[in-house]
Amino acid sequence: MLPQQAHHWWSVRGALRAAVAIASLLAAIKVAPAVLAQPSTSPIDAIEKGRLIYEAGQLGSGAPLTANRGEGRIAATGRAAACINCHQKSGFGLFEAANLVPPVTGPSLFSDAGPRTQAPRRAKGMEHQEFAFLTRPPYDALSLAKALREGLSPSGHRFQYLMPRYALNDADMAALIAYLRQLSLTPSPGVDPSSAHFATVVAPNSDAGRSKAFIEVLQACFHERHPREAGGHAWQLHVWELDGPPDTWGAQLEAKYNAEPVFALISGLGSDLWDPVHGFAQSLKIPSLFANLDIAPAAEQDAYSFYFARGLILEAEVIGQYFVETAPASGLKRVVQLDLAGSAGRKAASALENVLKARAIAVVERTLKQATPDELMANLSDLTGSDMLVVWLERNHLAALAQVPPPATPHIVVSGWQSGFENAPLPAAWKRIVSMVYPLDAPQRRAARFEFNLRPWLRKHAIEHSDEILLGNTLAACNLLSESMSRLRGHFFRDYLVEMIQNYPTGMGNAPASQAFPRFGLGPGQRYSSKGAYIVRFKDPSTNELELLHDWLVPP
């Protein structure tokens, strides 16, 4: 258990690996006091130059930053030597086991780090040892420069080996200090003295019943965990319903945000198009957490959006890997895909085509207009045993297969997400030979998870809907937000929230227990918590029971 005096930043958990151990604050050469006190460039220019040193490991000259361990030993250069690797974008640092990367925010360095007055915690047989950064006086420009070049704090404490030394000229040193002075100085918008504001986005054409139940879950979760009558920050949910074509969504979101700024976006309801929402969150640096989607956008390492999985794109990548693994033994030579024009399945088919063509595997795409029985039969008649058929059709279109005999290949894969998983409306003749991509938790385990973690909560709040996957994932998203916000300890910075989610997933306890996905795993730079799927088949064509055909498969 950590001493109470450590305050909020001790709760930040991150993977302190060898690659992370090479960034901190900087110094190596003597810096003139006049330069430290007043940079020669404008304040804005100095802050931007300092940001590039801190985040990108780029000096003012454009040359890479060099980290050393003394005696001429270079530890890293450029981006690998940047402060952000350890101290994080927010500046709040990381903590794991006995290893601490302390905060370097403006308040923590320059005004909020004097000796602690409260008595240390005591326990029989244990000696309390305070972290050195909690007993030093605040830094000023000169003492920080000394610390950066010599590794000595204002109290004379020598920094650990994890923090290297840096060779910076006077201007670069002044720029870095200017950046640190303002780092996480002003809290992010969306939290006022009495309320914390969050928004959920509902895309056009969302089913009315699903939308109603989805919003009820978030409202009940907010009221249960952060009611106004309990004191503190009451949580307020803003429902941002979009309309019109996607190219207007960005302007709609900006207008809603300008009318009422929010701290983060929580969950969300869409289908296969979410890029305008993703782009909005990225442009304003607003965390967007775990929307319910058929296809999640591609999220780069520093994106502000998190997703449970990539949906149909993940299924396509899993099918590609499954084909590569099984083709040699099965004699498979070609993949034939069926999808519907203008559907999410069309996008999944394109993703699978890209995966397989990169491996020089023959792919034939057959896009249907209406998926009538006649159209289906015409597109299946030439298949042979050396073909794998991949079907990207929704439940209402799969019903047409009742009038279509299976093709002459035993290798047929359907999308679990589109078909309805174990409830896929497949005729018995197809069930005998079909396999399915299954990105969810195994049916029995998922049923137990819903029975003990989801259904009692839904009954308590009188929320009814048949889509338990939607409701469970929405509740999990709310629980994850609540747990992460509590770990901020009142320091409401969006970058800090992002870091808490990506660095602290194992500390979330039972927060995601109601989600449908089999595991929740994130790390630095990761934006999808579930990264694989099973391949299953129907155990008996007369029932909906599934059995495992291929264990959890994670595409490269």
Image (cartoon, rainbow, N blue to C red):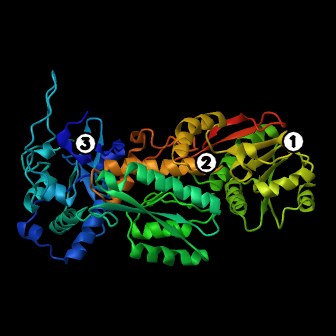
- Locate residue 448 relative to residue 436 in the image: left or right: left
Identify the element where label 3 is drawn.
Answer: strand
Q: Position of residue 25 (x, y in %)?
A: 21, 55
Name the residue type under label 3. Leu
Residue 472 in sight here: yes
Name the residue type under label 1. Ala
Q: Position of residue 440 (x, y in %)?
A: 62, 43
Mark 1 residue crowding within 10 angstroms, few (<14) / some (14–19) / many (20+): some
Query: Do the numbered discs 1 and 3 sit on residues whose CB atoms are within 8 Å?
Result: no
Nearer to me, 38 or 494: 494
Residue 292 in sight here: no
Observer-side mark, 1 or 3, equals 1
Mark 3 residue crowding within 10 angstroms, few (<14) / some (14–19) / many (20+): many
Q: Which residue is mark 1?
A: 428
Which numbered disc flags the more N-terminal residue, 1 or 2? 1
> What quarter of the picture does the N terminus occupy?
top left
Determine which of the numbered discs, if any, sits on residue 100 in the image.
3
Q: Which residue is mark 2?
A: 469
Identify the element where label 2 is drawn.
Answer: helix
